[in-house]
Image: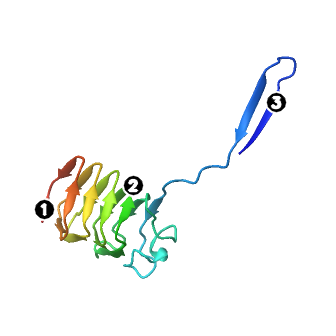
Amino acid sequence: MAAAGALAAGTGVLTAALFMPAAASASSSQTWTGGGDGTSWSDGMNWASNSVPQNGDSVTIPAVRFPARTVVSGMPAGTQLQDLTMTDASLSGGDVTVAGNFSWSVSQGFEVLGSPLTVEGSATIGGAGQQDSTEPMTFLGTADITGRVL
């Protein structure tokens, strides 16, 4: 850390400014495009940033080939996200913890959550379609569940 100080002329007041490197962002927003192999979480080309989401990121998985299903597989075990938003999309892989908001909406047909899920913040699940969770879902905060959830 470097410090710089200056004496304001004629005032006798010392002003100092601290110059510190900017802290790296703890999280970023990652959006699924399916532009790589179209299914693998670990393929950076499937993400708008061309890099795989990291722990602490907020992730959005939209319907990129609607009405065809968006299916994302191979999420690593122990994934920890800030927020997770899924729209007309399925997700499978290892367990995931969402610290903030989780939203999963399905407008038609069905989608599957094949990963154990823990939501510490708020959860909203709904839509005219059907959601099928094949793994346990744990809600530690508030949960608003409507529609057809199996």
> Answer yes or no: do the residues labelled 2 and 1 have beta carbons within 8 Å?
no
Instruction: Name the residue carrying label 2.
Output: 82
Residue at 78% over, 37% down: 4
Q: Is residue 48 visible?
A: yes
Give the mark, 2 or 1, whose residue is nearer the N terminus. Answer: 2
> Answer yes or no: do the residues labelled 2 and 3 have beta carbons within 8 Å?
no
Give me the disc on residue 148: 1
* For discs 2 and 1, the disc positioned in front in the rendered view: 2
Give me the disc on residue 6: 3
Give the mark, 3 or 1, whose residue is nearer the N terminus. Answer: 3
**In front of the other: 83 or 56:** 56
**In front of the other: 117 or 85:** 117
Callout 2 amino acid: Gln
Quadrant of the frame with the N terminus: top right
The answer to whether residue 120 is above or below residue 150 is: above
* Secondary structure type for disc 3: strand
In the rendered image, which quarter is residue 65 located in?
bottom left
Residue at 45% over, 66% down: 53
Residue at 37% over, 65% down: 79
Q: Is residue 9 left or right of residue 141?
A: right
Q: Spot the residue most to the front.
A: 1
Q: Neighbour class for label 2 at 10 Å: few (<14), some, many (≥20)?
A: many
Q: Position of residue 124 (x, y in %)?
A: 24, 53
Q: Neighbour class for label 1 at 10 Å: few (<14), some, many (≥20)?
A: some
Q: Position of residue 120 (x, y in %)?
A: 29, 51
* Secondary structure type for disc 2: loop
Residue at 12% over, 66% down: 150
Q: Neighbour class for label 3 at 10 Å: few (<14), some, many (≥20)?
A: few
CA distance for labels 3 and 1: 66 Å
